[in-house]
Amino acid sequence: MSYMKRLIILLILSAGFGPESFSQLTIEECQEKARNNYPLIKKYNLIEQAKNYSLSNAQKAYLPQLQVSAKATYQSDVVKIPIQVPGLDIPTLHKNQYTAVAEANQLLWDGGAVRSQKRIIEINSEVEEKQLEVELYAIEERVNQLFFGILLFDVQLEQNRLLTGELERNRLKVAGYIENGLANAADLDAVKVEQLNVKQAHIQLLATRAAYVDMLAIMIGETLDSNVSLVKPAVALPDVFSTNNRPELQLFEAQNNLFDSQKQLIRSGYMPKLGLFVQGGFGRPALNMLSNKFEPFYIGGIRLSWNFGSLYTQKNDFRKIEVSKNQVNTQRELFLYNIRLTESRENKDIKRILDLMKDDGEIIALRENIRKAAEAKVSNGTMTVTDLLQEISREDIARQTKAAHEIDLLIAIYKLKNTGNN
C-alpha cells in the first residue's frame, strides 16, 4: 500500500473517530462535574480546617496553664507581736510589701466539659457540612433542566431533518406535477415557503441548543463543543414508596444531635473540677510573715473547685434547648409533608404522560396514512398542494409530540428522583 493511500485512510479514520465522536456525556457525569465545579465545594475543606483548629484548642485545656502575677502594696498596719522578750529582737514588718508569683495549674478532671466541647465542635461542623449539602443538592435540578433541554432540542432537530427531507421529496413531486399540468408555480412556491420556514426553525433550534450547551459547560467547568452528544437516560420508573434520602433530613438529624450535646455541656458545668497546682514566687514577706527579707517561696498541692451557680439556670437552659429542638422537628415534619405532596403530584404527572404516550404511535401511523392519501389525491388532481402541506405539517406535529412526550417522561422521572434523592 502506498504512502498516499495510507495517509488517506488515516485521515478518514481520524475524521470518523475524532474527539467529537467520543464527546458524550451522561446526566450523572454532568451532575458530578457540576457539583465539583461549584465554588461552594471549597467550603468543605474550610469547614474541616476550622474543626481541626477548634478541636486542637479544646484539647489544650489539659495542658499546664501558667499565669504570672505581681503586686506591690502599702498597708496601714502590719502584724505585730504585742509582747517583748528580753534578749530577743522581734522585727516589725514593713508596711510596703512586694510579691511576684508564677503559678502552674494542671487539670486532672473537668467533669466532662472538654469532652462535651469537642463533641459540640464535631457536630457543629457536621451541621455546617449538611447545610452545604443542601445548597449543593439544588445544583442537580439545574443540571437536569439544561440536560433535558438539550435532549429536547436534539429530538426537535431530528424531526426538523425528517420534515426537511419530506418537503424536498414533495417539492420534486410538485415540480413533476407542473410538467404534467397537475400543479402550477404557486404550488411549488408554497412548498418552498414551507422549506424556508423549516430552515429558519432549524437555525433557531441550533442557536438555542448552543446557548444551553454553553450554560451546561459553565456549570460543569469544561469546554463543550456545540455538537456535544448527550446520552439519553433509560426510562426507569422509580418506586412510588421509595426511601427519602434528601440531605435536609440529615441536616435536621445533625441539628438534633447538636442540641443533645449542648445539654451534656450544661450538665458538665455544675460538676466539680480537680487539678494540681504549684506556685513559685519571690517577695517580702514570703511565707514567713515575720521576715522582712526578700525571699523565694513555693507552694504545691491539689485543688478541688465546685461551682453551683449554673444550677440556678439549668432548667431554663434545658427548656430553651427543647424549644429549639421542637422547632427543628416541626421544620422536619413540614418538609416531609411538602415532599409527600410533591411526590404525589409528580407521580400523577408520570401517569398522565404515560397515558398520553399510549396513543402517540397510533396517531403517527394514522397521520402518515392521511399524508400518503393526500399525496395520491394531489397526483390525481383532486387535492391542492396547500392541503397536502397541511397534512405534512400535522404529521410532523404528531411526531414532535411523541418525541416531546418521551423527553417529558424523563423530566418527570428525574424530578421524582430528585425529590426523594433516589
Image (cartoon, rainbow, N blue to C red):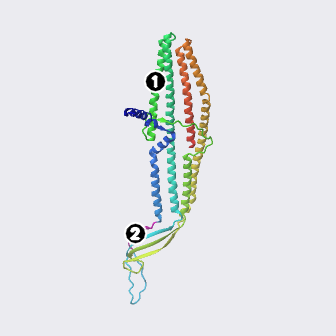
Q: Residue 216: x, y in percent?
A: 46, 37
Q: Is residue 75 visible?
A: no
In the image, is 267 to the left or to the right of 225? right
- Between 375 and 38, the one nearer to me in the picture: 375
Sequence order check, earlier mark of 2 and 1: 2
Q: Is residue 69 magenta?
A: yes
Residue 95, x across and y down, in percent: 38, 76
Secondary structure under tag 2 reads: strand
- Residue 199 badge: 1
**Residue that sits furthest to the front in the current view:** 1
Which kind of residue does numbered mark 2 sit on? Answer: Ser
For this view, does 415 lie left or right of residue 76?
A: right
Q: Main secondary structure of the magenta part?
A: strand
Which one is in front, 367 or 300? 367
Q: Position of residue 420 (x, y in %)?
A: 57, 43
Which label was assigned to residue 69? 2
Write the start and end of the magenta stretch as one range. 63-74
> What amino acid type should be assigned to the residue bearing mark 1?
Lys
Which of the image's four quarters has the N terminus?
top left
Q: CA distance from mark 2 to mark 1?
A: 90 Å
User: In this rendering, which labeled residue sits more in front, label 2 or label 1?
Assistant: 1
